[in-house]
Image (cartoon, rainbow, N blue to C red):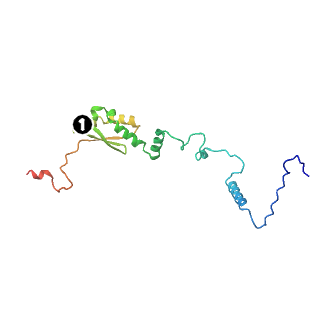
Amino acid sequence: MADPSDPLPPPARPAQSPPKPSGMVDPARALLAQARAAARARGRTGGVARRTTRADTATRSGSSPDDRDPQTLAAATSRLLAQHGWEVEVAVHSVMARWAQIVGPQVAAHCQPERFSDGQLTVRTDSTSWATQIRLLAPQLLRRLNVELGDETVRLVIVRGPDAPRWRYGPRAVRGRGPRDTYG
């Protein structure tokens, strides 16, 4: 008999579940056993914390900075340039943008860089006398450009004079000697 001062009756014993027939398997237990077997095959044991290696930290974030953290624009730009191999091209184009500062305003007034490919810089001048002058200054120009860009970035400076006048105007042209045949 229960004590009247005790407000709660004694806890009831839970009823035991009937035993399962021998042919049926609990699907949750089967999946758990399968996952444990796969983990053992990979060398992982349940319940034991494993040490992380440097390769593991590349796939998940932690207290140290990684690629998924906010980056500065300079860091993101330099990483993008390195991934695509654009460092030399960007450096050469920055030199082309600062051409007047590198060669001086007097020389820059008479020659402009035209293109850069395979270590060759092509420079266009506005007269044949300036083309000759730039050809004479090519070793100093080459040295100064390689100081700005890094050794052996520019291996050759090609100097071009002014273009010859073109006598073709419009989309159509007639074959022949050109304007010389009307002078005779």
Counting labels gives: 1
Nearer-the-camera pick, 72 or 148: 72
Judged from this view, the residue extending furthest toward the left is 184
**Residue 154 visible somewhere in the drawing:** no
37 relative to 66, above or below: below
Residue type at mark 1: give it.
Trp
- Element class at badge 1: helix
Indicate the position of residue 64 as horizontal and vertical percent values: 59, 39
Q: Position of residue 164 (x, y in %)?
A: 20, 45
Question: In the image as oriented, which residue stretches furthest toward the front?
Answer: 4
Displayed quadrant of residue 174: bottom left
At 27% from the left and 36% from the top, the residue drawn is 134
Which residue is found at the position 15% from the left and 52% from the top? 178
- Seen in the image, is 91 located left or right of residue 19? left
Name the residue nearer the viewer: 159 or 163.
163
Which residue of the protein is positioned furthest toward the right in this rendering?
1
Residue picked out by circle 1: 130
| Left or right: residue 127 compared with residue 37 | left
Quadrant housing residue 105: top left
User: In the image, is 170 to the left or to the right of 54?
Assistant: left
Q: Can you see residue 95?
A: yes
> How many residues crowd mark 1 within 10 Å: few (<14), some (14–19), many (20+)?
some
Residue under the point 22% across and 37% down = 129
Q: Nearer the viewer, residue 30 or 143?
A: 30
Judged left or right of residue 7, residue 154 is left
Q: Residue 169 at what x, y percent from top left?
A: 19, 51
Task: Estimate the x, y position of residue 15 in percent, counting from the top left.
Answer: 82, 59
Q: Above or below — where is 92 with respect to 40?
A: above
In the foreground, 60 or 151: 60
